[in-house]
Amino acid sequence: MAEPLRIALAGLGTVGAGVIRLLAANAALVRSRAGREIRIVAVSARDRVRDRGVDLSAFDWCDDMAAMASRDDVDAVVEMVGGADGPALTLAKTAIRQGKALVTANKAMIAHHGLELARAAEERGVPLKFEAAVAGGIPVIKGLREGAAANAIARVQGILNGTCNFILSTMEDTGRDFADVLAEAQALGFAEADPSFDIDGIDAGHKLAILAAIAFGARLDFAHVSCEGIGAVRAADIARARDLGFVIRLVGEADVDAGPPGAAPARLLQRVRPCLVPQAHPLAHVDGPTNAVVAEGNFSGRLLFQGAGAGDGPTASAVVADLIDIARSTMDGREAGPAFSVPVGELLAMEPAEPGDRTGRSYIRFTVADRPGVLAEITAAMRDAEVSIESLIQQGEPDAKGDVLVAMVTHEGPERCVAEALRLLDGSPSLTAPPLVMPILEA
Amino acid sequence: MAEPLRIALAGLGTVGAGVIRLLAANAALVRSRAGREIRIVAVSARDRVRDRGVDLSAFDWCDDMAAMASRDDVDAVVEMVGGADGPALTLAKTAIRQGKALVTANKAMIAHHGLELARAAEERGVPLKFEAAVAGGIPVIKGLREGAAANAIARVQGILNGTCNFILSTMEDTGRDFADVLAEAQALGFAEADPSFDIDGIDAGHKLAILAAIAFGARLDFAHVSCEGIGAVRAADIARARDLGFVIRLVGEADVDAGPPGAAPARLLQRVRPCLVPQAHPLAHVDGPTNAVVAEGNFSGRLLFQGAGAGDGPTASAVVADLIDIARSTMDGREAGPAFSVPVGELLAMEPAEPGDRTGRSYIRFTVADRPGVLAEITAAMRDAEVSIESLIQQGEPDAKGDVLVAMVTHEGPERCVAEALRLLDGSPSLTAPPLVMPILEA
């Protein structure tokens, strides 16, 4: 059997400890599938004395991560430090520069610096892999990069944040409101003390940008991902949606259009938003902290990948799958193929698409004062903006603050018309809170 | 850019034509992802003059498939001839012997001869790949072999036959009976004129045996797959199941147990059966001709892969994904790793497990004569076999033949007790047709 693949682990939080546990528990099968042993030789973390529930005595402890990444007896570095910049990025760059394979679970770092790191890895001829950065234990990077490689992908959609999905599906099951369920999620450890990164859609946006780059062969472009979170979704919206046959999910969606006539390259639209998902759509049955990704290939048709989106076990599963790939593919000093499925120089530079050009149905919910004429004002704005209303529900009773919810579903039409209607209503004293617009996904 | 990967295609049915169309339609992206051109140089099929809707003029036509597989200007052979033996197997063996990579969509051939072919491919150092043989366009072979490679898999479950799933979900949607829906499926082209291969569960069994070998690192063992089809499922069973909160699906399931105390190797159980699937199980939402596979890894947790299980586009997507892998991995004369994730010599030889040892809940439906004492006879047999009944439904009205259906759900218990109860009732004049037993999957 070939020489071991020698690993340095940086960052020993729950995921780092999970990787150590996995390599111990599944040692024989990992060796068999990798074609050689995957051996941890060195570890590093901020706090040496903390008890992580795993035995570190067999590994060299390094206080200096960058120095660890430069060791001659290390073939691959696993980065689980976290953060888009700082020590994680320094470590990643050092590892690649030193000719080490790099495996990371760090979506923020890849979303912000993935192209730069991929170019450095190509130049140095080392693998860069990040299966664990998107959708935890689901092998969706591999699924798109290799499994669906023969297809032009028209669209990717995903439930990419387990915290938001836990909150929304718990609201759905219990009828409770957002703040209440968020507090429970925090108590259960499903949400961070500062949950904004998750509930504002930023984390899902990082993952979407990575998926889009691979799916479309486009230059990674997190700066143009529009992220809208779930904080404005009310229990009443979920109840209305259910009456109409939908569930509400935070969906990251990316697709390409041909652009205006005469424009050469395709344009890329990347958005994270709460959406109404019909029961016949595969994402409608993704509950709790589960993640899922749907990709539509021009030959494969619609593919669904689903599983645990976070947690030490699933994330370790993805990290070690990357290590096994590296162990196999670099056995004779080879490299494992481009990180984003094609070399960075071949990735398309796509302009961001204009969202207003898109057509679809929307759910719009207004929070209005309980007085005559409000409905006439809203429907007049819709008429003037050429938004056609399919159905309208006004809640019977005002809530504690005296507000009434008015929810409507539009016929299919351009999104810019909906935006124009809201602009016409902007500043109206009839509206007591900003309206919430959610697109309705097609089955 | 590297030299083209030169392909010979054998078999030009709908899938073969699909591969030709895909390589033309997606030429630029395939070249980009493969790192080099994938170029068809030669084709072969039984009938030269048939119009396949694709232009063959750029390819050399070969009347002799085996000779085509021996050409010096061919690097990889794509086998889409079909059939477990005969010309397909001769072609496959010839291609490997001649040092060509082999890609096949032929589940019957892999289920029966996969180990022999994999061993030959290892000895010759050539890739053998068969993503298209299981679940059409879904990259589930890759998902298990590579994506879930870090895990000990406890169980795989799949909806692996689109014809059966189309029939069952149409019966569910329309309330129509099996024979009627089968006739429609045949008219629509979803079922063959001789449908037995599909509806008896053999086709699903082939795919299950392949999945099990990869998931468990076990020697492929189609001989011990027990296959039960959907021909005995009645509209009334589907209605009963729905009342109880289940859908009926033909599920292929494989798992391993530790065997009796002292027995060293794990034992493998492989079964294809109609099952009652609870709404909370991911397979409950797989409708129409869709396929899906669930794998439970010891670190990843439950993974779901879902998509189109058949058709020229999805199958071509899988075939070309294999070709892209080969184009990348063999760029410098390398090989792409073992076909069944570990070398054939390292695959475990697992004994078949004893199904009676398994515990679970069952749905049992009796077709009985409408006369006094029948229910007492059945329930006495259950008592004597120590089968505990959770619920029992007797249909109000006898059917046209004067038969009455009695359906029951058992409490969790060993399957051997259910088998014993049926043995006690065997030959009873009260039963007018053999009972139908379907396991109830856990959510």
Image: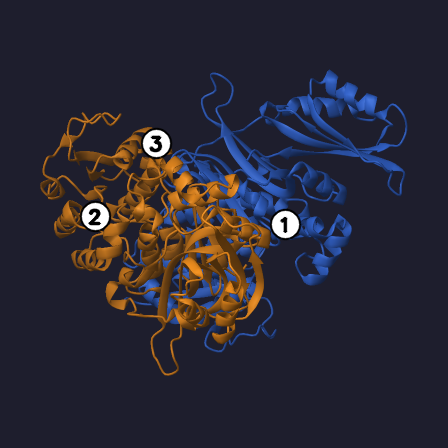
Chain colours: A blue, B orange
Query: Which residue sits at x=63%, y=45%?
Result: A202
Residue position marked by numbered label 2 in the rendering: B101
Q: Nearer the viewer, residue A236 or B333?
A: A236
| Residue A126 location (% of width, % of height) | 37, 52
**SS at mark 2 in the image:** strand
Per the model, the C-alpha gap separating discs 1 and 3 is 35 Å
**SS at mark 3 in the image:** loop
| Residue A7 location (% of width, % of height) | 42, 65
Query: Which residue sits at x=30%, y=48%?
Result: B197
Image side of residue A84 versus residue B315, left or right: right
- Relative to A113, say whether B148 is above or below: below
Residue position marked by numbered label 1 in the rendering: A165
Q: Inspect the image, locate mark 2, and give the three-letter code of the amino acid beneath it.
A: Ala
Q: Is residue B148 visible?
A: no
Report the residue that reaches farthest toward the bottom: B262
| Residue A67 location (% of width, % of height) | 48, 64
Residue position marked by numbered label 3 in the rendering: B26
Task: State which chain disc 1 sits on.
Answer: A
Q: Nearer the viewer, residue A43 or B148?
A: B148
In what quadrant of the picture does the N terminus of chain A appear?
A: bottom left
Mark 2–mark 1 CB contact (< 8 Å): no
Q: Nearer the viewer, residue B290 or B378?
A: B378
Q: Inspect the image, locate mark 1, and give the three-letter code of the amino acid beneath it.
A: Asn
- Relative to A273, say whether A66 is above or below: below
Of circles 2 and 1, which is in front?
Answer: 1
**SS at mark 1 in the image:** helix
In what quadrant of the picture does the C terminus of chain A appear?
A: top right
The mark found on residue A326 in the picture is: none
